[in-house]
Image: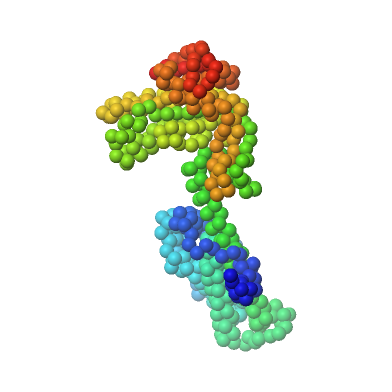
């Protein structure tokens, strides 16, 4: 048994706990490939958004520049804004093409960050040439504020490193501009007076320091927020993928109940519902399976189940379970419905039609045709969880389940494709179902396992 000293050493340090509280819980050591792919798709889409925003910025700047009166003298050596916008526009077109093709490599993303900041800084630097004034002029340019837009753009990818790269590039770029202004401004002095700074070309280092600090702090705050958000994104995508996986093993309604449950699911939780239970069995499957390879058997079952499930889902049914070649489905159990019997009866007719078409396809292909047997019963059922704390299962329990199972076997005795108790048949019609041709009533039927004679409605084979 470990000593208290061992336990104390194994406990995370205060610094480690504080870091986790600040940056959020660490990401799992290895995310599943499908989760990584989902996050990568989100990131690829975000790069398209980034590029579209860059196009909007280029368009906005171009319109403002074309409408604004020129403030520089006619003999200025060049106009930097049109040149910068043209180069940036060309680069952004290339970026957009790569983003649409999902072919943006890591190095290009980093280059894009640096290009954004570099073009901004070069444009600011060129102001003193444009206006033929000392370089200290550009230190007052409000254009620096656009650096925060470029930093914020990088948050869309949910990768803090690109935010940090943008902020670091902005801080270093502005520091370089300040250094250039200090070394290349004749007659310009450093001052400690804000009034002199505001009304002259003098340089107030404190003001420039404040700008760099602002860039750094905004960058750190956004990077920290993004680090926490990235953890949440990874967990959210993991849960979304898990929910998507659950929906392949469970009916969508059940998968939704599992993922949305506010409290832990426990065995024995159940709700009483009015529902209809449908059993479907593939006739002649066992002797046929003995002559097929395992792969052929699984392909046959997959083909059969896909056709049946499609017909069941088309009428609002939920698959409770697959039992070899048998299928148990419910209507109104996972999701209450005032038309549970009508929907189930319509599904019975459709699965019979689908099965007949399938048999004809197999015959045309030179394969042995297969038929189905189906039975339906409606009434009160309990819908809930069974099992133990380690292995739970949602299922339906009640007399309609037992009755449907017995009637499915009894269908052979009636030489029928589908069998319903007369009471269920009448309930379905009362709920709006219009029975198709081929149904007939039979009274006083003896069904194995049912003590009293039963009136049924059958759809003859």
Q: Nearer the viewer, residue 271 or 34?
A: 271
Instruction: Give the quarter of the image for residue 356.
Output: top left
Q: Nearer the viewer, residue 415 or 430?
A: 415
- What colour scheme governs how the chains and residues are painted in the rendered image of this protein? rainbow
From the viewer's perspective, is residue 281 above or below residue 57? above
The residue lying at 64 percent from left, 79 percent from top is 209
The residue lying at 55 percent from left, 76 percent from top is 173
Q: Total label count?
A: 0
Percent position of residue 384, x then y: 59, 38
Residue 244 is left or right of residue 20, and the answer is: left
Percent position of residue 203, x then y: 65, 82
Percent position of residue 97, x then y: 42, 57
Q: Nearer the viewer, residue 76 or 179?
A: 179
The residue lying at 59 percent from left, 85 percent from top is 182
From the viewer's perspective, is residue 296 above or below residue 198? above
Q: Is any atom of residue 28 visible in this view?
A: yes
Percent position of residue 305, x then y: 41, 34
Quarter placement of the C terminus:
top left
Q: Is any atom of residue 125 visible in this view?
A: no
The residue lying at 44 percent from left, 57 percent from top is 33
């Amino acid at each position: 048994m470990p000593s208290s000293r061992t336990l104390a050493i194994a406990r995370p340090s205060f610094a480690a706990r504080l870091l986790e509280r600040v940056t959020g819980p660490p990401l799992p050591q290895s995310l599943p490939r499908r989760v990584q792919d989902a996050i990568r798709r989100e990131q690829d889409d975000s790069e398209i958004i980034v590029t579209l925003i860059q196009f909007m910025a280029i368009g906005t700047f171009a319109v403002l520049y074309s409408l604004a009166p020129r403030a520089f003298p006619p003999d200025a050596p060049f106009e930097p804004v049109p040149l910068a916008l043209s180069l940036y526009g060309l680069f952004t077109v290339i970026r957009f093409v790569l983003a649409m093709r999902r072919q943006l490599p890591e190095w290009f993303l980093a280059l894009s960050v640096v290009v954004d900041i570099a073009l901004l800084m070069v444009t600011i630097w060129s102001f003193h040439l444009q206006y033929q004034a000392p370089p200290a002029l550009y230190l007052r340019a409000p254009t620096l504020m656009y650096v925060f837009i470029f930093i914020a753009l990088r948050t869309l990818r949910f990768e803090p490193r690109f935010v940090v790269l943008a902020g670091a590039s902005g801080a270093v770029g502005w520091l370089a501009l300040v250094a250039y202004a200090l070394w290349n401004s004749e007659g310009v002095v450093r001052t400690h007076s804000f009034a002199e700074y505001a009304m002259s070309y003098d340089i107030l280092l404190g003001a420039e320091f404040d700008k760099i600090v602002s860039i750094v702090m905004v960058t750190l705050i956004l990077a920290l927020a993004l680090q926490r958000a990235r953890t949440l994104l990874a967990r959210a995508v993991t849960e979304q993928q898990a929910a998507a996986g659950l929906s392949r093993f469970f009916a969508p309604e059940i998968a939704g109940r599992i993922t949305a449950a506010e409290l832990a699911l426990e065995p024995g939780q159940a709700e009483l519902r009015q529902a209809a239970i449908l059993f479907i069995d593939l006739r002649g499957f066992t002797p046929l399976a003995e002559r097929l390879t395992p792969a052929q058997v699984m392909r046959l079952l997959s083909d059969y189940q896909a056709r049946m499930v499609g017909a069941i889902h088309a009428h609002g049914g939920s698959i409770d379970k697959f039992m070899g070649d048998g299928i148990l489905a419910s209507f109104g159990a996972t999701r209450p419905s005032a038309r549970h019997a009508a929907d189930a009866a319509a599904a019975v007719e459709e699965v019979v039609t689908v099965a007949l078409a399938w048999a004809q396809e197999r015959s045309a292909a030179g394969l042995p045709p297969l038929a189905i047997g189906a039975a339906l019963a409606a009434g009160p059922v309990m819908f809930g969880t069974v099992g133990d704390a380690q292995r739970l299962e949602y299922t339906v329990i009640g007399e309609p389940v037992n009755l449907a199972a017995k009637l499915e076997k009894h269908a052979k005795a009636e030489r029928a494709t589908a069998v319903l108790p007369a009471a269920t048949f009448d309930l379905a019609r009362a709920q709006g179902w219009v029975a198709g041709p081929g149904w007939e009533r039979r009274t006083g039927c003896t069904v194995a396992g049912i003590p009293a004679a039963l009136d049924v409605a059958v759809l003859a084979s």
